[in-house]
Image: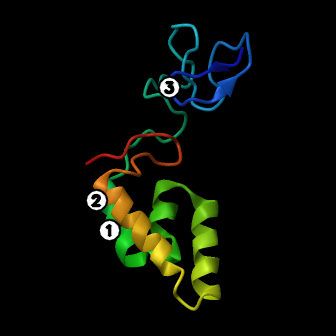
Amino acid sequence: MAKYCTSCGTQVEEGLKFCPNCGNSLDGRVPTNGGNTSGSIGNSEAKSKIVAGLLGVFLGGWGIHNFYLGFNNKAIIQIIVTIVTCGIGALWGFIEGILILVGNINVDANGNPLQD
């Protein structure tokens, strides 16, 4: 039977004490990720939903909102799509900006929830 992290949903191998993706304790102990108990490793500073959404609405074709949220590969793909489609692909970023503002996209690349 597959085992999953209760914090981020990543499938983990049997016998692991901590999630390799987010550092969450898999057996009820405190994670050993530098004292960070927020459920993620690295920068635990919450990103703003308003900032990310407005970047998506106004600069979404250039993937700026995805760079802000840490989705760098996705942002680069958005830039390429916008250039190849002579700007029509910017609609993708605009729609993502709206989805961020209404709460359908609500986490950054590290799985941290966006702050209002």
The residue most toward the left is: 116
| Residue position marked by numbered label 2 in the rendering | 50
- Choose between 113 and 11: the one closer to the eye: 11
Q: Residues within 10 Å of mark 2 (few under 14, many from 20)?
A: some
Q: Measuring 30% from the left and 46% from the top, which residue is drawn there?
A: 115
Circle on res. 54:
1
Q: Quadrant of residue 21?
A: top right
Q: Is residue 82 left or right of residue 47?
A: right
Q: Amino acid at mark 1?
A: Leu
Q: Is residue 43 left or right of residue 49?
A: right
The residue most toward the front is: 1
Q: Amino acid at mark 3?
A: Ser
The residue most toward the bottom is: 86
Q: Residues within 10 Å of mark 1 (few under 14, many from 20)?
A: some
> Alpha carbon of mark 3 to alpha carbon of mark 1: how far?
28 Å
Q: Position of residue 101 (x, y in %)?
A: 30, 58
| Residue position marked by numbered label 3 in the rendering | 7
- Closer to the chain start, of discs 3 and 1, is 3
Q: Position of residue 70 (x, y in %)?
A: 53, 55
Q: Amino acid at mark 2?
A: Ile
> Alpha carbon of mark 1 to alpha carbon of mark 2: how far?
6 Å
Say above or below: 81 vs 69. below
Q: Quadrant of the N terminus?
A: top right
Identify the secondary structure beneath mark 3.
loop
3 and 2 marks in contact (CB < 8 Å): no
Q: Measuring 58% from the left and 22% from the top, which residue is drawn there?
A: 5
Q: Position of residue 88 (x, y in %)?
A: 52, 86
Identify the secondary structure beneath mark 1.
helix
Say above or below: 55 vs 49. below
- Closer to the chain start, of discs 3 and 2, is 3
Q: Quadrant of residue 82?
A: bottom right
1 and 2 marks in contact (CB < 8 Å): yes
